[in-house]
Amino acid sequence: MARIKLELQDKLYIGNLDAKRHWGHARDYVEAQWLILQQPEPDDYVIATGRHASVRDFINRAFSEIGAKLQWVGGGVEEKGVGAKTGKVLVEVDPRYFWPTEVATLLGDPKKGPGEAGLGGQELAGGISERDGEGGSQGSRT
């Protein structure tokens, strides 16, 4: 999103907008791994937030973080996210990004996770947009 805002990229190409995914940030997963290593006895753990959102919802939240509101037009592989203010296509579905064996919902159960706090995730879209904006001009991301 930040690359689009900085005009380094025209649009985001994405797969299944309706897929529900268990979003989490690498920083939180690494912290959870560290907590697992601090346990006095080895055990099996699940690192998860216990929350999921559709790819479309995640994209809407991420674009709102850069001050853009999307309107969705069309359907299926022809669906597009259009900037509400600009009318410019900012998100486009591309079948190349569909999983070969698409799973409608992926959701982890955090009941047996390390630590009491569990993982964040609610502010994930905003955090990614902020960090992407900090490195958005580096050109190494696509």
Image (cartoon, grey):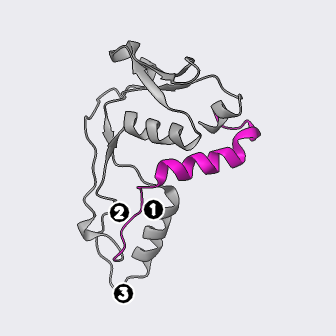
Is residue 137 inside the magenta stretch? yes
Query: In this orientation, which residue lies closer to the viewer: 101 or 1?
Result: 1
Magenta span: 116-142
Q: Which residue is mark 1?
A: 29
Q: Residue at x 59, y 21 (%)?
A: 86
Between 126 and 99, the one lying in front of the other is: 126
The image quadrant that residue 54 belongs to is: top left
Q: Quadrant of the N terminus?
A: top right
Q: Which mark is residue 47?
A: 2
Tell me the kind of residue under disc 1: Tyr
Residue 7 is left or right of residue 15, and the answer is: right
- Cα distance between the residues tagged 1 and 3: 20 Å
Query: Amino acid type of disc 2?
Result: Ile
Say which quadrant the C terminus sits in.
top right
The residue drawn where x is 40% and y is 74% is: 36
Picture layout, residue 93 above or below residue 44: above
Answer above or below: position of 62 versus 91.
Answer: below
User: Cα distance, mark 2 to mark 1?
Assistant: 7 Å
View extreme (right): residue: 138
Circle 3 SS class: loop
Mark 3 lies on residue: 40
